[in-house]
Amino acid sequence: MRTVQNLINAERQDARSGATSELIDPATGKVFGTAPLSSDEDVDTAYRAAAAAVPSWGAITPAERQRMLLRFADLVEARGDDLVAAESENTGKPLELTRTEELAVMVDQLRFFAGAARLLEGKSAGEYLAGHTSWVRREPIGVVGQITPWNYPMMMAVWKVGPALAAGNTLVLKPAETTPVTTVMLAELAAEVLPPGVFNVVCGDRATGQAVVAHPTPGLVSITGSTRAGSEVASTAALDLKRTHLELGGKAPVLVFPDADLAAAAEAIGIAGYFNAGQDCTAACRVLVHASVHDEFVQALVDWARDNARPGLADDADALFGPLNSRLQLDRVRGFLARMPGHATIALGGEQPGGALADGYFLEATVVTGLRQDDEMIQDEIFGPVITVQSFADDDEGLQKANDVQFGLASSVFTADHSRALRMSRALDFGCVWINTHIPLVAEMPHGGFKHSGHGKDLSMYGVEDYTRVKHVMSAIG
């Protein structure tokens, strides 16, 4: 049995109350450990540690901060096998995919943020009023509170921690209740190179998260989670006029035009739709195909998914994805399928696999056709291995259907027509538009959405700047 503890002021601590929650391996349904259920008192202790560390951490030079973050990245890389094994145990993810698609990316992102620590700039000095010189300082906010989701526990921790630390902030981070293991492990590695109190982790449930947001200390709170959770965070933060950074849900449209390479599109969409069991806000979950090639594309997607999109256990090197995060999430996804309207059809999947996967929270790769624009499965985030396919008659109808959801995180276009791709990229109301691909991200480019997908950016210098404040300084001269 694994015992997870909070990490506060570089020290492992249980919740003051002694309360814990069970941790379940979603691939087997078995309990493998416990984690603290932190109270307001634990959160307050963590924020006191973070606040005490602000003067020293914020005062070090960018070069020193960079060196520490690079050492942190080196430790993550060196102890990657332990992190991957723990992440797989906590989430059920395939080991090899987690190593290649998550760990390697995380290390690269940490190194990017280390470099970004030396690039924060203010506006150049100038005399905008006679006899006075003005300049702009870009400063750390101070203490920030952060909440990460269960779909990518350690990678989303890096997305939060990296820019906050690069900008010179200290932090209190609460991981998702079901997946705290690797977040605490990352904090323990960081404690080997960062001053005490800079990176604190408190584990717990929704009440713990509410305490992290409501506490008076942080100047900004950041969450990656559902739109409902983001709305609750924004409402609570507004009572204290805290800034918010919200990366929320998605319902990514994928527009496939008749001139696209349908086989290549089916493969790219299948990978981007089923990876991580579809538990990704940017997943290629909502495909819109021109009516003239709709049936051909559906067959291509079904054929590809049947041969390649297989769930499996952690040591299954051929599995594309693992289980859903919990029994609750599996039941939620199956509920969408159970409520599917009569005019829709399951073209592939829709069932729980048996055999070695029978005890876990697995669901087959699923394709659903025949849905209408106002159906629940089109409008709401399913967050499972389910891809829906609709048809459209022309560019205008395709664009209208693509934009006709409350979310605005990610989208893509598959076409050989460069002019059409550019028109669509301008008109799609989403924070990211991919052309003839879907889901790749790089540390240098921003990630974040519009509408009910939230505001603020992860990754890139834009993400680092979100964790800063701007100060004008004016001096009389002569």
Image (cartoon, helix red, strand yellow):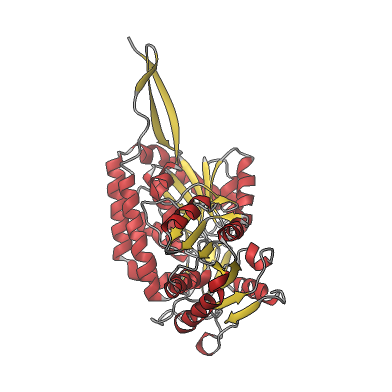
> Residue 143: image x %, image y %?
47, 42
- Picture layout, residue 417 above or below residue 359: above
Residue ranking furthest to the top: 478
- Picture layout, residue 159 above or below residue 340: above
Number of residue marks: 0
> Residue 287: image x %, image y %?
55, 67
Q: Nearer the viewer, residue 275 or 323?
A: 275
Q: Nearer the viewer, residue 49 or 429?
A: 429
Q: Nearer the viewer, residue 321 or 30?
A: 321
Q: Nearer the viewer, residue 8 or 107?
A: 107
> Residue 271: image x %, image y %?
45, 72
The structure residue drawn at horizontal position 28% and vertical position 59%, both measured from the top left corner, is 74
Q: Is residue 383 left or right of residue 269?
A: right
Quadrant of residue 11 within the rendered picture: bottom left
Residue 150 is at least partly visible in this image? no
- Picture layout, residue 193 above or below residue 312: above
Residue 217 is at least partly visible in this image? yes
The structure residue drawn at horizontal position 31% and vertical position 54%, both measured from the top left corner, is 111
> Residue 474: image x %, image y %?
40, 20
The structure residue drawn at horizontal position 50% and vertical position 88%, both measured from the top left corner, is 356
Identify the image quadrant of the C terminus.
top left
